[in-house]
Amino acid sequence: MWFNNANVCVHQANTHLGFTHIVMEGFVIAVHRHLSQSHPVFKLLAPHFLYLIAINERGVGALLEEEAIFDSLRLRLVLMVLLS
């Protein structure tokens, strides 16, 4: 059970948020800066990039800031280890 909980936390922070959303944010900015809105590649990617930056802001706030989910999970795990 503890391993599964830790695995989910690592997956959400590193794999999902880090390797998917944060990496793609650079592509979103580059596409908006260097391609016109009439470019076929821009039209193809625009629906996929629609809310990515807003989702990243919420994800970083919910997962990585102080007093966020990871801090509370870490505190619970430390208390459970100390009390057992």
Image: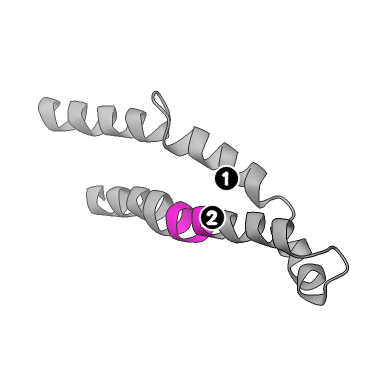
**Quick one: which residue is furthest to the right in this view?**
38
Element at label 1:
helix
| The C terminus lies in quadrant | top left
Q: Where are the magenta residues, as a range?
A: 16-23
Q: How is this picture coloured?
A: one colour
Q: Which residue is mark 1?
A: 56
* Residue under the image location 51 percent in, 53 percent down: 22
* Residue under the image location 47 percent in, 52 percent down: 17
Residue type at the position of mark 1: Asn
Q: Which residue is mark 2?
A: 21
Labels 1 & 2 near each other (Cβ < 8 A): yes
- How busy is the neighbourhood of tag 1: few (under 14 within 10 Å), some, or many (20 plus)? some
Q: Give the CA separation, mark 1 to mark 2.
A: 6 Å
Residue 73 is one of the magenta-drawn residues: no
Residue 42: image location, x then y, percent:
78, 68
Instruction: Return the disc, 1 or 2, that comes first in the chain's sequence.
Output: 2
Element at label 2:
helix
Residue type at the position of mark 2: His
* Residue under the image location 31 percent in, 48 percent down: 5
- How busy is the neighbourhood of tag 2: few (under 14 within 10 Å), some, or many (20 plus)? some
- Looking at the image, residue 68 sits to the left or right of residue 5; the answer is right
Residue 4: image location, x then y, percent:
30, 54
User: Against 58, is 5 above or below?
Assistant: below
- Looking at the image, residue 75 sits to the left or right of residue 13; the answer is left
Residue 52: image location, x then y, percent:
65, 52
Comparing 43 with 64, the one in front is 43
